[in-house]
Structures are given as C-alpha cells and as structure tokens.
Amino acid sequence: MTFHPSLSGSSLLIPSLLAISLALTAGCSSKPPKARYLAANAGSACYAKAVPTAGEGGLAWGNTLPIARQKSLNNCIRYAGRSGGTPRTCKVVLAECK
C-alpha cells in the first residue's frame, strides 16, 4: 500500500499568504517614488562652509545666510566628531549668497 498525501487547507495556507503578499507589493512598485527631500534644497541661494582646526568640516545650503551658517556649523561639529577632530573649534570660514 502506498501513501498519497492529499492537499488540505492548512498546507495551502503558506503558499496563499506568500502569493497575496507578493501581489500587494507588486501593485505598489508601479507607483512613482515620492521625493522625501528637495534635491540639494533646490532654490537655496546661500551657502556656508565651516571647518575645525582638526578633522572634517561641513558645507551647507540654506534659504538665508544665517540658516546656511548654522547648518554648516552643525555639520562641522558632527563630522569633526566622527573623524576624530576637534568639534569645539568649528568656525564658519565662508558664507555667501548667489
């Protein structure tokens, strides 16, 4: 006597769930991606660069000169700390608007 396994409802559960999840994700892939950030702050006319005495500095763009200066100072502090530099010595060395 040979045993022939029959397909029951529980054995079809996993393949059915897999097919449904693939169908749902495939439906979302045709949508165009949403831009989460503006491309390099398109429209920002001002930029600033801050550097520490040791380590990496930071360059940033902003709508106004004070915003660009603050962003570059924050970036300098972050990057100098990561690169083993001196974050407390960051100074803005260049700041201008187009």
Image: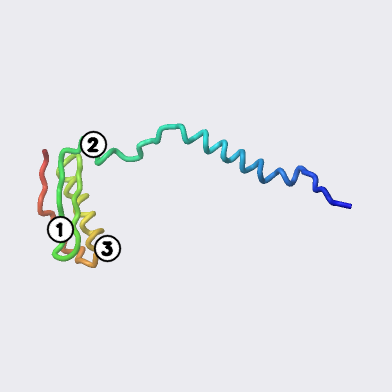
Which residue is the site of mark 3? 82
Mark 2 neighbour density, 10 Å: few (under 14) some (14–19) many (20 or more) = few
Mark 1 and mark 3 in contact? Answer it, CB < 8 Å: no
Which residue is the site of mark 2? 42
Query: Residue flagged by tag 1: what amino acid is it?
Result: Val
Q: Is residue 64 above or below residue 93?
A: above
Query: Residue flagged by tag 2: what amino acid is it?
Result: Ala
Image point (77%, 43%), residue name: 7
User: Tag on residue 2?
Assistant: none
Image point (19%, 66%), residue name: 86
Image point (10%, 54%), residue name: 93
Mark 3 neighbour density, 10 Å: few (under 14) some (14–19) many (20 or more) = few
Mark 2 and mark 3 in contact? Answer it, CB < 8 Å: no
Does 98 sit left or right of 31 as displayed? left
Q: Examine the image and state in which quarter residue 51 appears.
A: bottom left
What's the distance in space between the residues labelled 2 and 3, CA to CA? Answer: 28 Å
What's the distance in space between the residues labelled 1 and 3, CA to CA? Answer: 14 Å
Mark 1 neighbour density, 10 Å: few (under 14) some (14–19) many (20 or more) = many
Query: Residue flagged by tag 3: what amino acid is it?
Result: Arg
Q: Examine the image and state in which quarter residue 37 appears.
A: top left
Choose between 30 and 3: the one closer to the eye: 3
On the image, the x and y values in percent for residue 62 come to 20, 42
Q: Is residue 93 above or below residue 32?
A: below
Which residue is the site of mark 1? 51
